[in-house]
Image (tube, helix red, strand yellow):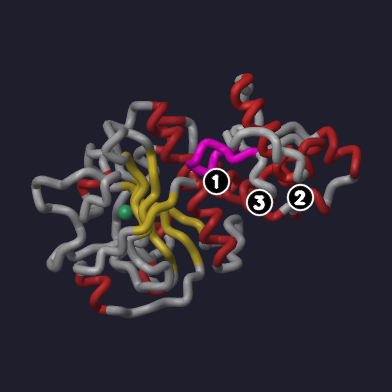
Amino acid sequence: MNLHKCILTRNDCYTSGRTITPRGVMVHSTGANNPTLRRYVQPDDGLLGDNRYDNDWNRPGTGACVHAFIGELADGSVATYQTLPWNWRGWHAASGPNGSANNTHISFEICEDGLDDPVYFAKVYKEAAELTAYLCKLYDLDPEADGVVICHSEGHTRGIASNHGDVMHWFPRHGKNMDDFRAEVARLIKNQSGKDELDMTKEELVSCAGTGDNPSGWAREHTEYCKQKGIFAGDGAGNYGWQQPITREAVATIVHRALEVAGLADSIPDA
Ligand SMILES: [Zn+2]
């Protein structure tokens, strides 16, 4: 997750200052074709870019506010911006006959594009799953328990949100539904906490194949050691790409760092 922070301190929701005990996470998408974070999140921190139209949400009178946005930075890369303290009462769900998810759920908006680009979708889906896993861990929530991780349209069905279709007008276009999303969040939490490893026999663990940033079972001790010691520093966005090929210059950097950790690099010039 590429997490940044820009609290919308001028939004009336922030200044009203009410807090909640988070019991879930509600997933929204913006309903407008504009994937840029600067449309909603300002001021420009050098990454967001400037919103020349002065219609961002960091202003009084906006009438809505969520805890985070996922979308594109000025350079086109995807990031998450926290926009309210996580335990603030957001204004994202309105209400239904059974109350309001504003009182129970942390919320985030995924900035929509034209809804058909699989590359953008894959990036924001991954970012959303990682953010949700992070929040579930933070508040000790089970993402697969009933009503914990839900989208806006599911909230409407449950009678705790207004009648909006997000995100079910978008996710299924790319072969995903909210059950897939919850399962992915649960998988991320297990991999992060190592809980799954406790449930595996040694043979199962060793043969467990890695994906993306998750190392294979046999390599976990080594990858974790290299992370902890700073021998392998990733690409700066929290991505280690454990399944990716590596260049010789990167190998040289890693060898140098390893020798430094071992106290054997004194005679080698600094890299
Ligand atoms: Zn919504």
Given residues 166 and 66, the one toward you in this image is 66
Q: Is residue 265 above or below residue 62?
A: above
Disc 2 beta carbon < 8 A from ligand 1? no
Pinpoint residue 50: horizontal percent, then vertical percent. 17, 46
- Residue assigned mark 2: 196
Quadrant in the picture for residue 208: top right
Dominant SS in magenta: loop
Mark 1 closeness class: few <14, some 14–19, many ≥20 residues within 10 Å: few
Magenta includes 256? no
- Residue assigned mark 3: 192
Which marked residue is nearer to the observer: mark 2 or mark 3? 3
Please report the residue visible at 35 percent of the width from the left and 26 percent of the height from the top. Answer: 117
Whether residue 242 appears in this view of the structure is: yes
Given residues 180 and 13, the one toward you in this image is 13
Please report the residue visible at 72 percent of the width from the left and 45 percent of the height from the top. Answer: 261
Q: Is residue 223 above or below residue 147?
A: above
Given residues 222 and 20, the one toward you in this image is 222
Label 2 with label 3: CB-CB less than 8 Å: no
Whether residue 92 appears in this view of the structure is: no
Which marked residue is nearer to the observer: mark 3 or mark 1? 3
Magenta includes 237? yes
Please report the residue visible at 70 percent of the width from the left and 42 percent of the height from the top. Answer: 260
Range covered by the magenta-colored residues: 232-240
Query: Which of the two discs, 1 and 2, labels the residue nearer the N terminus?
Result: 1
Q: Is residue 160 left or right of residue 240?
A: left
Which marked residue is nearer to the observer: mark 1 or mark 2? 2
Q: Which mark is residue 104?
A: none
- Residue assigned mark 1: 179
Specify the farthest residue to the left.
Answer: 53
Q: Ligand 1 sits in which quadrant?
A: bottom left
Residue type, label 1: Asp
